[in-house]
Image (cartoon, grey):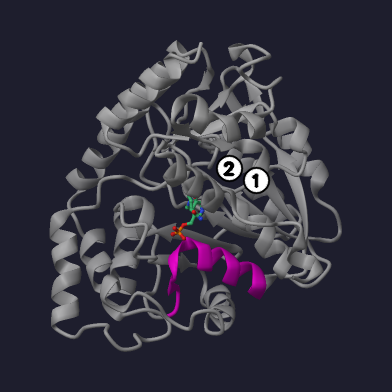
């Protein structure tokens, strides 16, 4: 393994899902729903397979039906106008979109600023692109993980090429506010930075939180690569259909890298996702309401079990602080040790947030639980965790 990748080892999601299987634990680690997306969309995929649509290589940028549906979705929800032919690119999940965008836009030696904790593929892809990651840490403040805008400004240097933003944010559940996004946009314009914005949880925002695409702020249209995913929005994480939207120049650049990664993927599923994006608003509202109810079950249960809970404003993850469980049970606030012990102790799997940090000590006491599971499963997990104390 080369030096760029050597530090990364096996992704925590594979490690923890394997542990869940081995111990027969409830898996609240890796974020995937235990209920598949809409029946009619599964039927649409079957029809595409049967009718021979997408069984051979689809077009490089994605099938026209899907590109049109992605543009229409952006228009309908956010009033954003994209040309489906020049400004939309279908990818093998958001994961490939992130990789291709970084490989296309980062020169070796460029600095890339990412919000820490960051989704684990960011660090690996910045490294593969030869870039240097510069983490800006979100810290707990009044019950949520918040961005310090002064710290973000101070992190920009003459070598900074790009800001990699994620909102709603995995793993903290933070949703950046209009004021924060406006400040990020101003900084990007002032320092002439490119921005990649990972918005795969765009439909999962709760309470008063609102998802506002970063690209809608002044000066951002020409410098922003926006990323979405059908895996999250329609509960089909195995289909690996994601997308990029941006100016023709940016999308062409991302496509230049993408063509040598997978070239294309997920042929028949692309047709099904095109239908999914056209579902009525009630689908998106019901999906959000369902996840909100699940969030409340898990957040209340974890609090009752003795964790400090950071109630997420978005995503399907709850971050907790394990230290209130006491030094013995929390392994002196070491989330790694706690998560490795938890399957044996309680039959539950979670993710130590420390894996998403360069400053490991900052992330040490935080542990993430996914709530994209049936309510009965969440209740059983909570019952098991309550017995720990
Ligand atoms: N970005 C974030 C923030 C995610 O949480 C995920 C999924 N875990 C991805 C990207 C990857 O999405 P996909 O499954 O579409 O590749
Ligand atoms: N995005 C999912 C999570 O954060 C996992 C995706 C993966 O396994 N790579 O849990």
Span of residues in magenta: 86-104
At x 75% / y 37%, what residue is drawn?
360
| Above/below status of 273 relative to 282 | below
Callout 2–callout 1 Cβ contact below 8 Å: yes
**Tag 1 residue:** 184
Q: Which residue is at the front of the view, 2 or 240?
A: 2
Q: Is residue 102 magenta?
A: yes
Q: Position of residue 212 (x, y in %)?
A: 46, 44
Q: Secondary structure at mark 2?
A: helix
Q: Residues within 10 Å of mark 2 (few under 14, many from 20)?
A: many
Q: Main secondary structure of the magenta part?
A: helix
Residue 209 occupies which quadrant of the picture?
top left
At x 55% / y 34%, what residue is drawn?
172
At x 31% / y 59%, what residue is drawn?
73
Q: Which residue is at the front of the view, 218 or 346?
A: 346
**Tag 2 residue:** 181
Q: Position of residue 244 (x, y in %)?
A: 47, 67
Q: Which residue is at the front of the view, 265 or 137?
A: 265
At x 46% / y 67%, what residue is drawn?
245
Q: Secondary structure at mark 1?
A: helix
Q: Is residue 304 left or right of residue 49?
A: right
| Above/below status of 187 relative to 349 | below
Q: Position of residue 267 (x, y in %)?
A: 31, 78
Q: Position of residue 66 (x, y in %)?
A: 30, 72
Q: Is residue 16 magenta?
A: no
Q: Is residue 232 left or right of residue 134?
A: left
């Amino acid at each position: 393994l080369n030096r760029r990748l050597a530090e990364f080892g096996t992704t925590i999601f594979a490690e923890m899902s394997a542990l869940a299987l081995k111990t027969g634990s409830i898996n609240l680690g890796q974020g995937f729903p235990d209920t598949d997306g809409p029946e009619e969309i599964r039927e649409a995929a079957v029809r595409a397979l049967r009718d021979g649509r997408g069984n051979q290589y689809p077009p490089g940028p994605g099938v026209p039906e899907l590109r049109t549906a992605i543009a229409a979705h952006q228009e309908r929800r956010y009033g954003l106008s994209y040309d489906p032919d020049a400004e939309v690119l279908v990818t093998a999940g958001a994961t490939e979109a992130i990789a291709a965008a970084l490989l296309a836009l980062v020169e070796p030696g460029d600095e890339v600023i990412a919000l820490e904790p960051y989704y684990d593929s960011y660090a690996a892809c910045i490294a593969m692109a030869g870039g240097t990651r510069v983490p800006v840490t979100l810290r707990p403040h009044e019950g949520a993980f918040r961005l310090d805008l002064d710290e973000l400004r101070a992190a920009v240097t003459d070598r900074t090429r790009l800001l990699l933003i994620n909102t709603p944010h995995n793993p903290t559940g933070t949703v950046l506010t209009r004021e924060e996004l406006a400040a990020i946009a101003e900084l990007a314009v002032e320092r002439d930075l490119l921005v990649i914005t990972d918005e795969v949880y765009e439909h999962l925002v709760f309470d008063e939180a609102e998802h506002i695409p970063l690209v809608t702020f002044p000066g951002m249209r020409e410098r922003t690569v926006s990323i979405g995913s059908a895996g999250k929005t329609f509960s089909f994480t195995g289909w690996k259909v994601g997308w990029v939207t941006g100016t023709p120049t940016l999308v062409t650049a991302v496509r230049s890298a993408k063509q040598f990664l997978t070239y294309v993927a997920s042929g028949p599923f692309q047709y099904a996702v095109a239908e999914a994006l056209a579902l009525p608003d009630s689908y998106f509202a019901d999906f959000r309401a369902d996840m909100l109810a699940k969030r409340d079950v898990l957040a209340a249960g974890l609090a009752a079990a003795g964790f400090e809970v950071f109630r997420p404003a978005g995503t399907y993850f709850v971050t907790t602080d394990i230290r209130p469980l006491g030094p013995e049970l929390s392994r002196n606030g070491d989330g790694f040790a706690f998560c490795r012990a938890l399957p044996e102790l309680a039959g539950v799997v979670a993710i130590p947030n420390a894996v998403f940090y360069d400053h490991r000590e900052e992330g040490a006491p935080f542990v993430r639980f996914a709530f994209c599971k049936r309510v009965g499963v969440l209740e059983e997990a909570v019952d098991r965790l309550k017995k720990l104390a």
